[in-house]
Amino acid sequence: MQNIKQYLNKEISTALKECSDIQSSNANVTTSSRPEFGDYQANGIMPVAKQLSANPRELALKVIDYLNDNSIALIETLEVAGPGFINIRLCERSVLSMANDLLSGKNDAISVTDSPMKVVVDYSSPNLAKEMHVGHLRGTIIGDSIVRILEKEGHEVIRQNHVGDWGTQFGMLISFMQEIKRSDTENTPTELSDLEKFYTAAKARFDSDESFSATSRQAVVKLQSGDPNHRAIWEEFIETSLLHCDAIYKKLNVTLGRADLDSESRYNDILGNIIEELELKGLVTESDGAKCVFLPEFIGKDGDKLPIIIQKSDGGYLYSTTDLAAIKLRSEQMMADRALYVVDARQSLHFKQVFALAKSAEIASNNISLEHIAYGTMMGPDGRPFRTRSGDTVKLIDLLDESIARAYDLVTEKNSSLGETERRKIAKVVGIGSVKYAELSKSRTSDYVFEWSSMLSFEGNTAPYLLYAFARINSLLSKSPESNSSIVISSISTDEERSLLIKILQFPEIVNTVSTDCYPNLLCNYLYELAGIFMRFYEACPILKADKRIKSSRIALASLTANTLKEGLGLLGIETLEKM
Ligand code: ARG
């Protein structure tokens, strides 16, 4: 089913085509920038008039006449404005009936798309030698919101957690483990449960001892050629590391499981074929013993072509090689229509090169759209990438626990009469919700400053504000027994009711924009605005004291608002609380 904007756009575009004879005409309908003049506006008349060298206001009038003659559902009035816009006011009856169909459960707010796609979403994708750190937070959360939204719209989503489990660092870890197993020093950290400590100790050894680093390099080769002993130790690391990831995903309520793993190691055996394929197509050049591809569109600062290295001089493969193999799988076997890569913006060049090479070498078919969903860096208050005081990376699990602890203090301060269990429960939802919302509500492409005080604030565009708004509506509904029966929104007697109702009906439009462009902050803005419009309605329109009919209509409206907030937060991966 189409949302209102799509419906209006289709109808008005048809009228514009009829009136102009230009088949490519697009009415370009948007939500109105001046709600006092209309709910939507069509901006597409002027460019068409220009093509015809006609007067845009006259063309707009023709379009309006055409639409009036064909009495289009949903539209109450149409008006020409400014140099040739059309202001559109929706008809109250249609709006009410749409809303009541949602309320009764006859229609879903987000209806299933007519053109479902198969979408691979590569997200989270940490490197496994270490525990997940704050740098993995944004990709994990943004990716998870995108998959929820795509699935809600009826697309087939294939989650891919492209974990780094095959790099040179594993040679170092394996050698260090072997060394520990041989000696019996008590002070060496054999416990893998603290991967971080283990990694640091191994790295120190690697940096300070040449023979150890040589052994480490041989260990990678042995691992990659299938030596069972090396493989067994490696598996131990991977399992421990994955257990850490599982714990994080569970705590974050992120929908990634073991079945979604798309480990780098999985591609080991086909990397050689990728090189061969590129060689056969005549794309490979040797440079200093390494195999490279030079594409004309990638030029460095000095004017020379930039290489895409696909095999090192020692025979080792690279990140790019694995990504080419993954693209082949996603395109040829999964036959995806879109492959989204929710990865740090600092990898932009990598993806530009790999995508371009995959397309030109026909590793990716023409049908697949390869998209880097880039996100900016999380900065500390000092404006540098977020780190601990001592300059170490912050473990993600520690950050999440701190957020829950801070939320617990906040809840205790606000509502000390609540029981301990209740407060713990609220703290978990608020703590995790706040971290997630803080990431999601910023435009993903920009860097942003991570700040406890603003993300845990009850004011502004934050999770606590929205969760609290939702809980408040629920408390209102719980005071009104009517809310349990099948009530309807029967009239819109004030501007506040009208704005709220129309805002609710615009929910699927926003969701659709996010599934196309992958900017979840637009959904956050929408929910924040919705909560604000609800508050204005709540202040201006008495509910519990109103006449019976109006009371039940307003309760129905409140209930629809609550449903929308809950569903919207759910699409962001954020849980709600009935009470707070
Ligand atoms: N493991 C990589 C990293 O931590 C991210 C992988 C992203 N996905 C991909 N297909 N390259 O930087």
Image (tube, grey):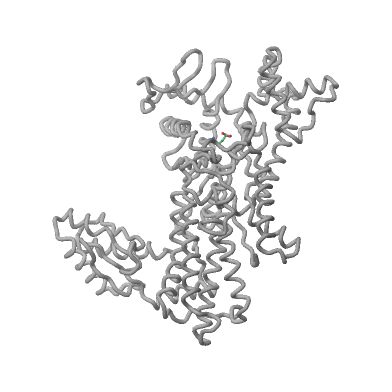
**Residue at the front extreme of this rendering:** 413
- Total marks shown come to 0
Q: Residue at x 52, y 67 (%)?
A: 108
Residue sitting nearer the eye, 68 or 428:
428
Residue 136 position in % (x across, y down): 59, 40
Viewed as shown, does residue 468 lie left or right of 335?
Answer: right
Q: Quadrant of ligand 1?
A: top right
Residue 125 position in % (x across, y down): 59, 38
Residue 414 position in % (x across, y down): 65, 62
Q: Residue at x 63, y 56 (%)?
A: 430
Viewed as shown, does residue 454 lie left or right of 44?
Answer: right
As drawn, 304 above or below 449: above
Residue sitting nearer the eye, 97 or 547:
547
As drawn, 387 above or below 294: below
Residue 227 position in % (x across, y down): 72, 22
Quadrant where the N terminus sits is bottom left
Q: Residue at x 48, y 65 (%)?
A: 532
Residue sitting nearer the eye, 376 or 308:
376
Quadrant where the C terminus sits is bottom right
Residue sitting nearer the eye, 185 or 413:
413
Q: Residue at x 25, y 70 (%)?
A: 79
